[in-house]
Image: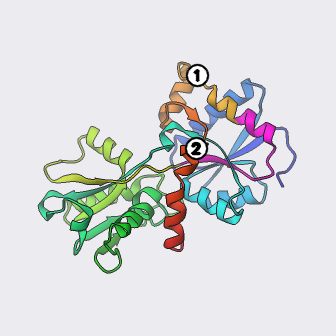
Amino acid sequence: MPTQRNALMIGAVAYDPKVIPIWDIIRDYYNRNGFPIDYVLFSNYEAQVESLLNGFIDIAWNTNVAYVRIQRLLEGKAKALAMRDTDIGFTSKIIARTDKGIASLADLKGKRLALGSADSGQAAILPYHYVKASGVDPETDLTLLRYNLDVGKHGDTGTSELEVVRALKQGEADAGAIGESTWIRLLEQGQVNTDEIRAIWTSPGYSHCNFTALPEFDDEKARRFADLLFAMDPTEPEIRKMMEMEGLNEWVSPEGAGLEGYRVLFEAMADQKL
């Protein structure tokens, strides 16, 4: 059970230096609104999951992989409180060298496919799942190249996805899996020549991060915590700054499409015994 304290303790993973100013702004916003919180940063999601389960923190800002693990351990009874609008309909891309004759997932047979960190939903777990579902067996029909960088951060740093792109550029891989947000950013920054590398497939939408609490977390506190998130005004300079760093336009309820979007990851992680 969570320990008694004046402020709710929120957990987040320190995958980037910007995490500190993001959470300073969120903490100060809650404190100004008479709902005191504080936060603690973890080096990896496994430690954060354990800390939520043993009551060291009250709420965890989880990746989809961490959320699935908690729900498995709690038999689906954990509470998802809120998520970013950009966490709904998240997608992955399969990108490929244009000189390899790859235009569809079926064309991956016999090719070298680069995947990101093994614990990354967007760059490894779900791409593997969808490739397998298409009728291409990743273990027998492909040569898999895995770039397991920053394991424990569930792909948040994006480092492994950049390695996937590098592998394609340098001819080490024929195709690779990355998150659509990474692909868009690389295109905007001019870091990919689409005459040489192009996207050949986009996954169905799925859900990414959410705020997770234990089943016994007080319903009224859960409602107040979520309502204050939903009430954040993006026209306020500090809130806008935080939202831009955190990659959202507004906080939304996970009910409906948000929760449904985790179903495929439950299936993928079970199938891959993760």
Name the residue carrying label 1: 233
On whether residue 214 falls in the magenta region, the answer is yes
Q: Label 1's element? A: loop
Residue pictured at 81% horizontal, 51% vertical:
216
Note whether residue 173 is visible: no
Sequence-wise first label, 2 or 1: 1
In space, the residues marked 2 and 1 are separated at their CA atoms by 24 Å
Q: Residue at x 64, y 32 (%)?
A: 229
Q: Is residue 117 left or right of residue 228?
A: left
Query: x and y percent of residue 181 in the render?
Result: 38, 45
Residue 135 occupies which quadrant of the picture? Answer: bottom left
Q: Is residue 271 above or below residue 116?
A: below
Q: Which residue is mark 2?
A: 256
Residue in front for this viewpoint, 218 or 235: 218
Q: Residue at x 78, y 60 (%)?
A: 54
Magenta residues, start to end? 209-225
- Visible residue check, residue 34: yes
Tell me which amino acid carries mark 2.
Answer: Gly
Q: Which of the 4 image quarters holds residue 24?
A: top right
> Percent from the top left, x then y, of residue 58?
75, 48
Q: Amino acid at mark 1?
A: Asp
Vertical arrangement, residue 153 with respect to residue 4, above or below: below
